[in-house]
Image (cartoon, rainbow, N blue to C red):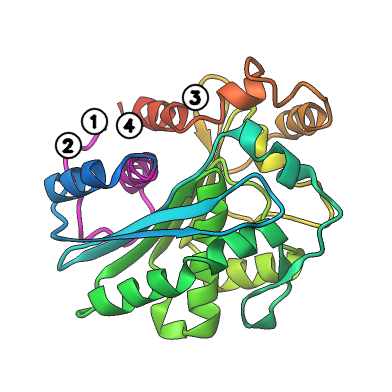
Amino acid sequence: MPVPSTLDHRSRSYSLDLAYWLATASDLAYKDEATVEERARAWGFDRVRHHRTRFTPPFPLEDTQAYTVASDDMIITAFRGTEPTQIRDWLSDATTPPWPGPARTGYVHHGFAQALESVFPAVRAAVEKYRTNGQGLFFTGHSLGGALAMLAAARLYLEAPKLLADGVYTYGQPRTCDRLLAAACDKGFKERMFRFVNNNDIVPQLPPEPAFTHVQALRHFDADGRIHASMSLLGGLTDRARGLTADALAPAADGVRDHFIHHYIAVLEKNLA
């Protein structure tokens, strides 16, 4: 199966092709606005809206950035992530109280919730404006952006069920919410929400359990880049061990190297080749 040269805007169900393109869209969220607009046009999207809001949480993050692109058949909202060393403190901070989940369903990490809150009204407005004929709706993001994509989709669904996304694809997403909200997402987004984890990526092992957890639908790349629908017991134990070591977030550590979005794109390309 070759790497797809064009994005199929009529895609609705899970596929590695779609996973590849949404990973590429997540990577694009790191670029400047002019690059986003140029690339969006090349991909067949004629409508683009940028979302950027500054705020001052008790964490080393100053703004939330995302973009929404739309065509007659597809809408994608992609959230920008951040480097793992920049979110070390607020991924491991257990002193900040949790934030109530959407529609009072469970609770979420305070920092993620506040980051989304700053930009969510603009994201919802763009989706409601562009979704004029039932286009496929997708949310995506890498790292912090994955957490925000998952929460944005969950909030839209729980607060306005008609805005249920057709797909939520995240890459290197940290744990984001409690078991109650995760269970609601597992039910509401069955065969729609997927989180990708590359080998020893440390960020999905943070913040620590049991306060925070993940949705069930996992796509895990092993050390050889092969994709699996679950993580082996040995692999899980290895990742947990890395998550407990002080140097797991060091720049040269496997846990950090495996986290970068270009590694996710590379292993997706390998599985498509």
Residue 10 on the magenta segment:
yes
- Crowd around label 1: few <14 · some 14–19 · many ≥20 (10 Å): few
Kind of residue sitting beneath label 4: Leu
Mark 4 vs 1: CB contact within 8 A: yes
**Residue displayed at 44% across by 75% down:** 121
Alpha carbons under labels 3 and 4: distance apart: 11 Å
Q: Position of residue 59 (x, y in %)?
A: 69, 49
- Chain part drawn in magenta: 1-29
Density class for disc 3 (Cα within 10 Å; few <14, some 14-19, many ≥20) is some
Residue at which label 1 appears: 2
Residue 82 marker: none
Q: Do the numbered discs 2 and 1 sit on residues whose CB atoms are within 8 Å?
A: yes
In front of the other: 56 or 172: 56
For the N terminus, the quadrant is top left
Residue beneath disc 2: 5
Name the kind of residue labelled 1 in the image.
Pro
In the rendered image, residue 168, in percent from the top left (x then y), is placed at 45, 58
Give the Cα separation between the discs numbered 1 and 3.
16 Å
Q: Which residue is mark 4?
A: 272
Single out the mark in the foreground, 4 or 2. Answer: 2
Give the Cα distance between marks 4 and 2: 12 Å
169 to the left or right of 33: right
| Amino acid under disc 2 | Ser
Give the quarter of the figure containing the C terminus.
top left
Please tell me in which quadrant of the rendered image residue 31 appears: top left
What residue is at 69 percent from the left and 34 percent from the top? 232
Tag of residue 225? 3
